[in-house]
């Protein structure tokens, strides 16, 4: 092999550069802190469904709410957890408890680098701004 | 009669023509029935505009338009007509009803501003062309609805609507100067979405009248259910001559306009000049 030393060095440099993000994360001690979500400010202790379910599936539930309200004109949701009924409304029901949008929705969405476009149209209630 | 090959073929040919003809007639009849306006299962909401009660340069028109546009956060880009977004607006009478081809039009109707909005047609062309079903005719009350989540901004509906009732958001509506302050109870739209009047479905749900009707002072607009024979709107329609926009298109618009003149023909001077010498052009 001609110029074996140059090629090997070049390959080594390439491998180090290509895997540098992995090294950087493994060696840097400070991993970004998981976001701390604000607790309901109105004293409410339960969500419309189990916390674990909401954490994993709130986006699907909101999609389902959206279609039911807009297309079927049905606005009342009955919780499978408690049997209580809620008005299906992002601005009114969700943000009634999670009134600090920036410390609840935005904190987690920023952390996980997702960019939902709910608020390009829907209006954040005044107290939640 | 003796059976011949010739006779048999004649008979078979005539029978074939007869069968084909009757099928075609039956298909045609069925097709014309399908173009009848579909009856809605529940209510059939409609609006009557009493044009007699609107004067020229009436402040009421602005008041009604404002009430609607403020309640629904409709962006005001009126400085550039290309960007204009409107749910309810006014046009002079001859333009609004140009298909009626009025000659020697009554003086008080000439150039009279006429309130226009989505007609919530019984046979809406806009919903047929929507590729995503973002607009549809609600079966429970006949309102032509919009799902702004689903609109992809193709603007087929804008082209299909013969009344100009649909507007496209060329610009981000939140950047409109009048939306610096937003009504918190209603969402805005985003750029690239078509919007129009929805007969205030959000207010109907709460048992309230549409914002335009509520802004009226003196029954200038009457809103109600056409499927209820005792409703006020049915009584108004039964007692007054009304016109609708572009009736020839078969869209069956559900916004009616009262234009009648309360005067009877006896109140005019007799038409004797036709026969008088020197009078008229006899």
Image (cartoon, grey):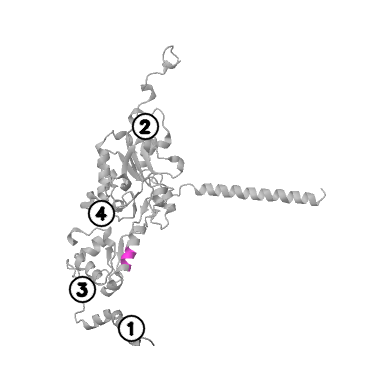
Pick whichever, B268 or B273, lies toward us. Answer: B273
Q: Of tags 1 and 4, which is closer to the observer?
A: 1
Mark 2–mark 3 CB contact (< 8 Å): no
Secondary structure beneath dot 1 equals: helix
x and y percentages locating residue B182 in the rendered image:
22, 53
List the single residue furthest toward the front: A2
Can you see residue B112? yes
Left or right of B94: which side holds B180? Answer: left
List the single residue furthest toward the top: B277
Residue B174: name its quadrant. Answer: bottom left
Alpha-carbon span between mark 4 and mark 2: 42 Å
N-terminal of the pair, mark 1 or mark 3, is 1
Report the magenta stretch's main SS.
helix
Q: Of tags 1 and 3, which is closer to the observer?
A: 1
Do badges 2 and 3 share one subunit?
Answer: no
Alpha-carbon span between mark 2 and mark 3: 68 Å
Give above or below for B235 relative to B18.
above
Q: Which residue is mark 3?
A: A35
Do badges 4 and 2 share one subunit?
Answer: yes
Q: Which residue is mark 4?
A: B174
Q: Which residues are magenta?
A: A60-65
Mark 3–mark 4 CB contact (< 8 Å): no
The chain identifier of the residue carrying mark 4 reads: B
Q: Of tags 1 and 2, which is closer to the observer?
A: 1
Of the numbered discs in the image, which one, if any, rests on residue A42?
Answer: none
């Amino acid at each position: 092999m001609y110029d074996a030393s140059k090629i090997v060095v070049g390959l080594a440099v390439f491998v180090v550069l290509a895997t540098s993000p992995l090294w950087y994360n493994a060696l840097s001690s400070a991993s970004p802190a998981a976001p701390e979500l604000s607790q309901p400010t109105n004293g409410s202790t339960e969500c419309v469904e189990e916390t674990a379910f909401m954490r994993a599936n709130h986006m699907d539930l909101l999609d389902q709410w959206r279609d039911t309200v807009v297309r079927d004109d049905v606005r009342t949701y009955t919780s499978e957890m408690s049997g209580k009924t809620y008005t299906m409304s992002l601005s009114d029901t969700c943000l009634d408890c999670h009134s600090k949008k920036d410390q609840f929705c935005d904190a987690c969405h920023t952390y996980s680098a997702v960019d939902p476009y709910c608020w390009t149209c829907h209006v954040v209630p005044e107290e939640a701004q | 009669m003796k059976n011949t090959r010739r006779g048999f073929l004649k008979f078979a040919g005539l029978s074939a023509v007869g069968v084909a003809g009757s099928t075609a007639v039956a298909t045609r009849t069925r097709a014309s029935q399908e173009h009848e306006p579909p009856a809605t299962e529940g209510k059939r909401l409609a609006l009557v505009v009493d044009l007699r009660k609107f004067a020229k340069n009436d402040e009421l028109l602005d008041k009604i338009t404002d009430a609607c546009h403020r309640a629904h956060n409709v962006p005001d880009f009126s400085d550039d007509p290309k960007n204009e977004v409107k749910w309810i607006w006014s046009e002079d009478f001859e333009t609004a009803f140009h298909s009626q081809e009025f000659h020697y039009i009554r003086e008080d109707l000439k150039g009279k501003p006429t309130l226009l909005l989505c007609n919530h047609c019984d046979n809406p062309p806009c919903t047929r062309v929507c590729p995503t079903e973002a607009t549809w005719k609600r079966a429970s009350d006949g309102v032509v609805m919009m799902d702004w989540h689903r609109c992809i901004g193709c603007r087929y509906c804008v082209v299909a609507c013969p009344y100009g009732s649909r507007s496209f958001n060329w610009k981000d509506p939140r950047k409109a100067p009048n939306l610096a302050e937003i009504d918190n109870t209603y969402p805005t739209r985003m750029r690239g979405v078509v919007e129009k009047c929805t007969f205030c479905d959000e207010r109907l749900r709460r048992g309230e009248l549409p914002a335009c009707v509520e802004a009226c002072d003196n029954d200038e607009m009457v809103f109600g259910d056409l499927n209820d024979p005792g409703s006020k709107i049915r009584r108004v329609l039964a007692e007054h001559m009304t016109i609708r926009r572009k009736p020839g298109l078969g869209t069956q618009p559900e916004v009616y306009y009262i234009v009648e003149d309360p005067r009877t023909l006896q109140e005019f001077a007799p038409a004797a000049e036709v026969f008088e010498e020197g009078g008229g052009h006899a």
